[in-house]
Amino acid sequence: MQANALNHYVHCRYVVSTTPQLPLADESCSLIYSNLVLQHMARRFAVSYLREFTRVLAPGGLLVFGVQDSFATPDLASSLTRFRHIVHLRSRVRTWFRRSGGDMQMHCLPERVVRQALGTAIIVDIRYTNTAAKDFNGKLVYLQQPPRSGYVGRQYCVRKPV
């Protein structure tokens, strides 16, 4: 895996998992970071991974992750965009004709669902982000307020109680 090949820190390792159960011992990680991943999974998988993250997080450890919380639809254009993302018609047609494996999907994970999945872990901070903006290009920006239209990105900082 290229991430491990480029890793310069002996106390840091990258793990790939193809199952919902992470191949890590309970309370074995002091920091877990996930960005631009969970929103591309169906809700049940994202919730499962949040539970796994808290399982493997050491007491006093930090979990930082970003998700798309909701979709702001102040106008017809925004509503149509959201409808398109839910139906995935183009992706279904391409898959049907074997033109591609389908497009990346976007799913929302509301704060109430996040809080439930985290169990007893403590949310230290929540920030609005630009992670779903058309001009994002990997440049994370914290926003003072949620965007007026489109996906509402949030980054959570969570601590596991000692």
Image: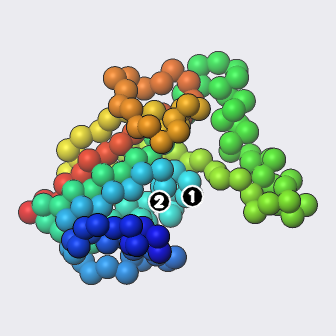
Q: Is residue 34 above or below residue 71?
A: below
Q: Nearer the viewer, residue 21 or 115?
A: 21
- Looking at the rendered image, the quarter that the C terminus falls into is bottom left
- In the image: residue 19, left or right of residue 73: left
Q: Secondary structure at mark 1?
A: loop
Judging depth in this view, the residue of 142 and 89 nearest the camera is: 142
Residue 74 image-quadrant placement:
top right
Q: How is the image coloured?
A: rainbow
Is 54 rendered above or below residue 145?
Answer: below
Q: Residue at x 55, y 31 (%)?
A: 135
Q: In the picture provided, is 118 more to the left or to the right than 146?
A: left
**Whether residue 96 can be seen here:** no
Q: Nearer the viewer, residue 96 or 4?
A: 4
Seen as rendered, the residue at the extreme left is 162
Q: Which mark is residue 111?
A: none
User: Do the residues bearing badges 1 and 2 touch, measured as CB atoms within 8 Å?
Assistant: yes
Q: Amino acid at mark 2?
A: Ala
Report whether residue 160 is seen.
yes
Residue with the mark numbered 1 = 42
The residues bearing labels 1 and 2 have C-alpha atoms spaced at a distance of 6 Å
Q: Position of residue 59 (x, y in %)?
A: 14, 66
112 vs 20, nearest the viewer = 20
- Residue topped by disc 2: 46
At mark 2, the secondary structure is: helix
Which of the 4 quarters of the picture holds residue 31?
A: bottom left
| Image spot of residue 79 (x, y percent) | 67, 28
Type of the residue with mark 1 = Ala
